Image (cartoon, rainbow, N blue to C red):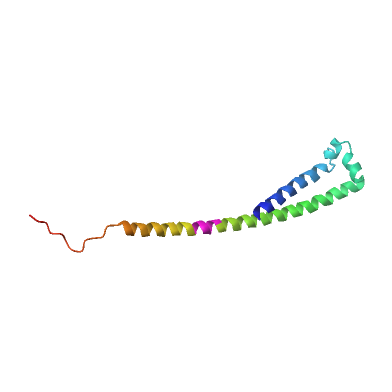
Amino acid sequence: MYTFLMIIHIILAIALIVVILAQSSKGGGLDGMLGGAASNMLGGENASKFLKNTTKVLAVIFMFSCLILTMQTKNRNQIEASGKGVEIYKKQQQKEAANQQTLPAEPTQPQETQE
């Protein structure tokens, strides 16, 4: 699930970059570099409105994608941490049990020495 969301997030980022670069600005943007091809392809004046609206929509979707990925990462880290905590606890219990088994038993009666 996390991988799928990350792929969608990357696609949204690339689409947002392309749409922003395609808009004409004071410097002409990508449209100015292409000789007005983007405006001709999208229909002149309507291209600017379309690109602005597309930028807004992609920006909102991108922000929601960021929030969803943040929640997924938090949940993922909590699951990993809880899983590791349980594993560490089990290993400690196993070590304690092994140490108790390997300790020599104390003699109950003192041994008498023969002379």
Place residue 61 in its image quadrant: bottom right
Give x and y (percent) for residue 65. Answer: 71, 54
Q: Is 83 part of what is drawn in magenta?
A: yes
Q: How many marks?
A: 0
Give x and y (percent) for residue 68. Answer: 68, 57
In the rendered view, tell whether residue 67 sits above or below residue 42: below
Which residue is nearer to you in this view: 38 or 108? 108
In the rendered view, tell whether residue 110 sits above or below residue 6: below
Give x and y (percent) for residue 69. Answer: 66, 54
Left or right: residue 85 versus residue 48 is left
Q: At x 74% / y 48%, what residue is drawn?
A: 11
Image quarter of the N terminus: bottom right
What are the residue bounds of the magenta stretch?
80-85
Name, please, the residue furthest toward the bottom. 108
Q: At x 82% / y 51%, what residue is drawn?
A: 54
Which residue is nearer to you in this view: 9 or 39? 9
Left or right: residue 19 versus residue 44 is left
Give x and y (percent) for residue 101. Answer: 33, 59
The chief SS type of the magenta part is: helix
Q: At x 86% / y 50%, what residue is drawn?
A: 50
Q: Is 45 part of what is drawn in magenta?
A: no
Image quarter of the C terminus: bottom left
Which residue is nearer to you in this view: 107 or 64? 107
Name, please, the residue furthest toward the left. 115
Q: At x 72% / y 54%, what residue is drawn?
A: 63
Which residue is nearer to you in this view: 47 or 75? 75
